């Protein structure tokens, strides 16, 4: 397994980007649960963030693509608005052990 971060490295209601090898990922903490996704919009394959670590809309309720404004549910990555409606972000399998977030061994394989 590959260590991603400590659970306290991501504030509640916030997001944070990561680079693991050649993969770009991001995590969102909502209601004390950490969700990790590949940093890639299903519409054009581009990175999502507006600014560094800024993956959420202005209310912090949804993940938002900076290019076309597509909106994704934090809990499952489903696109609910925008050019990729009906598609979803690729969720990355993680496990938390002793307050550390780890990627499962096959989590970032193509």
Image (cartoon, rainbow, N blue to C red):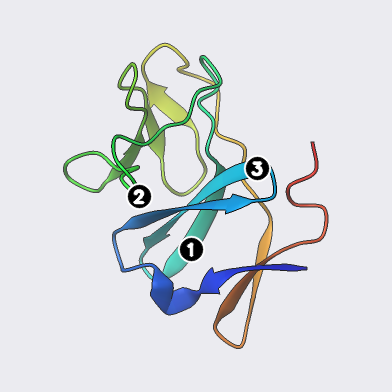
Q: Is residue 35 left or right of residue 73?
A: right
Q: Which residue is mark 1?
A: 34
Label 1 sits on a secondary structure element that is: strand
Whether residue 27 is situated above or below residue 96 in the rendered picture: above
Q: Which residue is mark 3?
A: 23
Density class for disc 1 (Cα within 10 Å; few <14, some 14-19, many ≥20) is: many
Give the mark nearer the N terminus: 1 vs 3: 3
What's the residue at 61%, 88% (across, down)? 98
Q: Is residue 91 left or right of residue 52?
A: right
In the rendered view of the protein, which quadrant contains the C terminus?
Answer: top right
In the rendered view of the protein, which quadrant contains the N terminus?
Answer: bottom right
Q: Which residue is mark 2?
A: 53
Residue furthest to the front in view is 21
Q: Nearer the viewer, mark 1 or mark 3?
A: 3
Mark on residue 68? none
Density class for disc 3 (Cα within 10 Å; few <14, some 14-19, many ≥20) is: few
What's the residue at 32%, 26% (across, down)? 66
Q: Quadrant of residue 32?
A: bottom left
Whether residue 71 is situated above or below residue 17 in the rendered picture: above
Label 2 sits on a secondary structure element that is: loop
Residue 64 point in image, percent of width and height:
33, 33
What's the residue at 24%, 48% (across, down)? 60
Residue 26 point in image, percent of width and height:
49, 49
Density class for disc 2 (Cα within 10 Å; few <14, some 14-19, many ≥20) is: some
Q: CA distance from mark 3 to mark 2?
A: 15 Å
Residue 80 point in image, percent of width and height:
39, 26
What's the residue at 75%, 52% (across, down)? 107
Q: Nearer the viewer, mark 2 or mark 1?
A: 2
Q: Is residue 19 left or right of residue 81?
A: right
Residue 43 point in image, percent of width and height:
51, 15
């Amino acid at each position: 397994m590959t260590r991603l971060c400590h659970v306290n490295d991501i504030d509640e209601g916030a997001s944070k980007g990561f680079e693991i090898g050649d993969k770009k990922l991001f995590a969102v903490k909502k209601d004390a649960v950490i969700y990790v996704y590949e940093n890639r919009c299903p519409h054009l394959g581009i990175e999502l963030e507006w600014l560094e670590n800024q993956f959420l809309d202005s209310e912090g309720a949804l993940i938002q693509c900076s290019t076309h404004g597509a909106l994704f549910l934090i809990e499952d990555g489903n696109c609910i608005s925008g050019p990729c409606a009906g598609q979803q972000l690729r969720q990355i399998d993680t496990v938390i052990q002793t307050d550390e977030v780890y990627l499962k061994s096959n989590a970032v394989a193509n």
